Amino acid sequence: MNAEIRPIKTAAETTLSTAFASAKGRLPGLAALRESEFKRFETAGLPHRRVEEWKYTDLRALMRDAKPLAAPPGADAKVRAKDAGAALAAVEGRRIVLVDGAFVPELSDFAGLEGGLTIRSMAEALAAGDAAVAERLGRIVPTDNVAVALNTAFMGDGVVIEVAAGAALTRPLHLVFFNSGGAPASVFTRSLAVIGKGARAMLIESHEGTPGSDYQVNTALEIEVGDEAHVDHIKITGEGAGSLHVSSLMAAVGAHARFNEFLFTTGAAVVRNQMFIHFKGEGTVAGIRGATLLNGRQHADTTLVADHTAGACISREVFKTVLDGESRGVFQGKIIVQSHAQKTDAKMAALALLLSEEAEADSKPELEIFADDVQCGHGATTGALDDDLLFYLHARGIPPKEAEALMIQAFVGEAIEGIEHAGLRDTLLEHVAAWLKTRR
């Protein structure tokens, strides 16, 4: 007789099971989907180092406990959120504010919406049984990722953005996710953006939290990009120093489109940014980039799967990581070229700069190619600041700290310069300069 082996649940897994049993009756809509996704999570448990995709980010070990589900934001939390996202004021984006995972219309900017643009609450769409939303959730880019399953089970609120075919938004949409830190809490947000054929839109996500607060975030965004559309998505993670942040992007890109993705990470104790991008139409051009700056004992993981399922697409992936103190940076990137995706041109590079002997960089770029008429390549480098270049700067009277700062700015700036929006580009370069000033 074979005995059934049951893995021992961690304290966090037990708390999540209890929380789901208590909350599922009041979560908005899609009860059957929530149940099935939570069963998937319970079967797999929190991902750990024996799961290949999570080998460098052992969430079972890093997530010692699970915080209670965040309560709806009170008046005090909304007051603290008024200045959230202010660092991006120069971008002049249309603010869409979520506080502790809840959409807050009174803090958002809905004045003079452009024709063809609609913005609404995800919770309200789910509660109303919106068929157009329900048929897309989890289906734009299907994945068995356990973090996405957990998000689907617990998703509370978020935003649904629709841009009609041919519409061109004159202002970026700035999604401000603010965690007030009033009490230890976990937040599960889910958003959906549907960009019509030939439309143009820029989406900016900024994630902020109260310094010193203890909270956990599991956020997901699904983007459907129509044929001939032009979409830019920029995600800025500046969470509080004690937080855990897991983010999932599922994007399906149509034919002859332009898609640009940029990740900028400086905050949180633990960050996992995972992207699942499918090129579903021919002739698309994509730039997927990122810059990460870490110090102390921060841990940041960027995981990318770029799946070319249609031919003649061009993609460029460039990720820069700067590591100081005892921080750890992880990059896992996989380019997949399916057998019918001939004429694919894809290049991926992961570059890490170590500023201390205690910092660690782990890079794992991969190619899976099933077509024979392609141009694909990948590379990874890890190193310290060049002593010869530092000497050159010192010899010209530049103090050591300033010389290091100039070289770090140049290193990171190569990724940031790919952002088309000049105001946002300048703002992120200012963020880099501010981070450099915090170095000892």
Image (cartoon, helix red, strand yellow):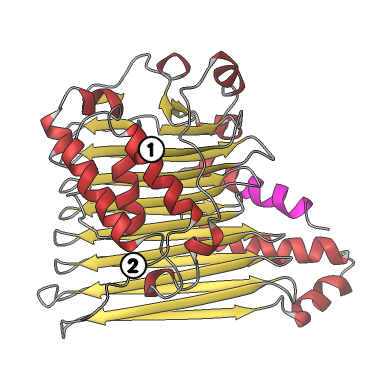
Residue nearest the viewer, comparing 262 with 59: 59
> Considering the numbered disc 2 on the image, is that residue within a helix, a strand or a loop?
loop
Looking at the rendered structure, which numbered label has been put on residue 189? 1
Apparent side of residue 305 relative to residue 327 in the rendered image (left or right): left
Highlighted magenta segment, given as a residue range? 429-438
Tell me if residue 17 comes above or below residue 353 in the rendering: above
Q: Give the label, 1 or 2, closer to the camera.
A: 2
Residue nearest the viewer, comparing 213 with 328: 213
Q: Amino acid at mark 2?
A: Arg
Which residue is farthest bottom? 372
Apparent side of residue 163 relative to residue 327 in the rendered image (left or right): left
Q: Amino acid at mark 1?
A: Thr
Tally of numbered tags: 2
Q: Quadrant of residue 158?
A: top left
Residue 394 seen from this side: yes
Q: Residue at x 18, y 22 (%)?
A: 128
Residue 74's x, y, as percent? 53, 17
Which residue was labeled with disc 2?
Answer: 6
Tell me, yes or no, whether the highlighted magenta stretch contains residue 195.
Answer: no
Q: Main secondary structure of the magenta part?
A: helix
Q: Quadrant of residue 147?
A: bottom left
Q: Residue at x 34, y 45 (%)?
A: 151
Q: Earlier in the sequence, mark 1 or mark 2?
A: 2
Tell me, yes or no, whether the highlighted magenta stretch contains residue 433.
Answer: yes
Please tell me how crowded label 1 is: few (under 14), some (14-19), or many (20+) other residues with Cα within 10 Å: many
